Every structure is written in C-alpha cells, then in structure tokens.
C-alpha cells in the first residue's frame, strides 16, 4: 500500500513540475500587455500571431477572460488590432491603463 502512495505521489509531483515548466516557458517567451485598474489587473501574454495565456487578478467579481474565445477573435482580426481594441475597451470601461 505504501508503494502505491509513493507512485501516485511521484506522478503528481512530475505533472506539477511539467505544468510549472510549461507556464514559466510560456510566460518567459511571450510579450505581455499589462492592464491595471482599481477593479483588478489583466495580463495578456501573446506571440506574433496568437494569445498564449492570460492572468487575471480581480478586486471585484467584474473581470472574466475567455482565453479560447478571445484567441479565436484575435486570430481573426490580427494580434495588433486585437491589442489596440482590448486596450481601448479596458481604458473606457475601467479607471485603468494598459502598457
């Protein structure tokens, strides 16, 4: 029984390390649009043709971000146009700014 728990624990640790490595790689190799406001912060990570990830820190329940839907939209209109549109939306709908 002890061996089974050790094997399960090893698999869990391995998956955790792989997931963390993927997150760090994506974060380190992507450009970022960082938007901050008093309601919360959104960081969009992107490469030249798609959104690679996002991080949302809310101070209210107001912010949600549909990564798959937004990525599909960004690929339709182009990443530069998407980032401009998102920045405009964020600055118009919050008291924040994007860099």
Image: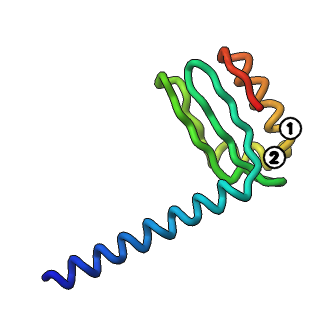
Q: At 74% from the left edge and 39% from the top edge, which residue is drawn?
A: 33
Give the total number of marks visible in the rendering: 2
Q: Helix, strand, or loop for circle 2?
A: helix
Q: Position of residue 66 (x, y in %)?
A: 59, 41
Q: Mark 1 highlights which residue? A: 81
* Residue 59 as seen in the image, left or right of residue 37: left
Q: At 21% from the left edge and 82% from the top edge, which residue is drawn?
A: 4
Q: Disc 2 to disc 1, how far (Cα)?
A: 10 Å
Residue occupying the far bottom of the picture: 3
Q: At 43% from the left edge and 66% from the top edge, which residue is drawn?
A: 16
Q: Helix, strand, or loop for circle 1?
A: helix
Relative vertical location of residue 3 with respect to residue 65 in this rendering, above or below: below
Relative vertical location of residue 18 with respect to residue 64 in this rendering, above or below: below
Relative vertical location of residue 6 with respect to residue 52 in this rendering, above or below: below
Q: Mark 2 highlights which residue? A: 76
Q: Local crowd at mark 1 within 10 Å, few (<14), some, or many (≥20)? A: few
Q: Position of residue 84 (x, y in %)?
A: 83, 32
Instruction: Determine which quarter of the picture holds residue 22.
Output: bottom right
* Residue 95 as seen in the image, left or right of residue 9: right
């Amino acid at each position: 029984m002890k061996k089974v728990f050790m094997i399960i624990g090893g698999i869990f640790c391995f998956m955790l390390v792989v997931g963390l490595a993927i997150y760090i790689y994506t974060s380190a190799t992507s450009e970022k649009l960082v938007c901050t406001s008093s309601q919360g912060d959104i960081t969009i990570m992107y490469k030249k043709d798609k959104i690679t990830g996002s991080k949302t820190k809310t101070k209210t329940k107001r912010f949600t971000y549909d990564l798959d839907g937004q990525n599909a939209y960004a690929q339709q209109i182009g990443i530069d146009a998407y980032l401009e549109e998102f920045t405009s939306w964020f600055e118009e709908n919050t008291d924040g700014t994007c860099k």
